[in-house]
């Protein structure tokens, strides 16, 4: 008698986040019953960040990274490899990813940016700074860019762009809400799609 194994190996995702973790929560929720992968590690650079409370509530292990060790040496590369991480998802993570981590996970690190790259990207362009710049420039649309991560800020190959209209009465705050709707709608879907590869 031959027993056919139907055990599916779930791919492991590490989410890197610096803040409240709303995108992290959406990804966790989306993958809760997935047969493709699961969030198995939360990596954070800010003690007390909301994303750590999400990790605790969801029973997901977390690591608080120390800046010096993150940018020098390969402590965290080894930790991620020991945790069998297949995909790294940056969800509001504010540090640049060091070259050794990019090289250890080629085409397996993705980021979401709250604007239509290549516009409004680069060092210092995150969160409300992006929305303020977009409004100040009189843009008629904004949106999100999900892209692969390389050694430069917001420079990796794009995976998806989705747009929203900016009206004359939009403020950086109202634009932020429109962009967040797109983030929550698309980021979990793209993460799941990448697990199929």
Image (tube, rainbow, N blue to C red):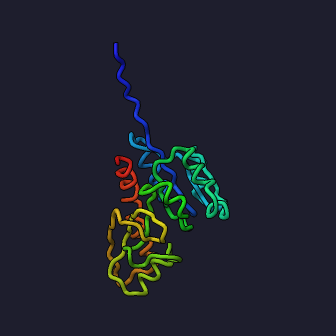
The one nearer the camera, 189 or 67, is: 67
The one nearer the camera, 130 or 97, is: 97
**Is any part of residue 30 visible from this angle?**
yes
Image point (34%, 16%), residue name: 2
Asked if 163 appears above or below 74 in the picture, the reply is: below
Question: How many circles with numbers are drawn on the protein?
Answer: 0
Residue 137 in percent (x, y) is at 40, 87
Left or right, residue 19 beside residue 122: right
Farthest bottom residue in view: 137
- In the picture, residue 44 is in which quadrant? bottom right
Residue 71 in percent (x, y) is at 61, 64
Asked if 33 appears above or below 25 in the picture, the reply is: above
Residue 54 in percent (x, y) is at 56, 52
Image point (38%, 25%), residue name: 5
Residue 47 in percent (x, y) is at 66, 60
- In the picture, residue 110 is in which quadrant? bottom left
**Is any part of residue 48 visible from this angle?**
no
Left or right, residue 98 beside residue 11: right
Left or right, residue 73 beside residue 2: right
């Amino acid at each position: 008698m031959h027993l056919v194994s139907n055990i599916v190996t779930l791919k492991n995702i590490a989410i890197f986040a610096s803040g409240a973790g709303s995108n992290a929560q959406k990804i966790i929720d989306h993958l809760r019953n997935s047969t493709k992968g699961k969030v198995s590690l939360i990596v954070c650079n800010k003690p007390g960040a909301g994303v750590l409370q999400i990790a605790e509530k969801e029973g997901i292990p977390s690591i608080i990274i120390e800046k010096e060790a993150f940018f020098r040496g390969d402590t965290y590369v080894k930790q991620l490899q020991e945790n069998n991480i297949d995909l790294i998802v940056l969800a509001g993570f504010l540090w640049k990813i060091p070259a050794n981590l990019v090289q250890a996970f080629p085409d397996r690190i993705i980021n979401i940016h709250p604007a239509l790259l290549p516009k409004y990207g680069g060092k210092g362009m995150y969160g409300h700074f992006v929305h303020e710049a977009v409004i100040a420039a009189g843009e008629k649309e904004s949106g999100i860019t999900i892209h692969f991560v390389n050694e430069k800020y917001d420079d990796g190959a794009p995976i998806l762009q989705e747009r929203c209209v900016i009206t004359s009465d939009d403020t950086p705050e109202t634009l932020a809400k429109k962009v967040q709707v797109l983030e929550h709608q698309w980021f979990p879907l793209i993460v799941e799609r990448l697990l199929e590869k």
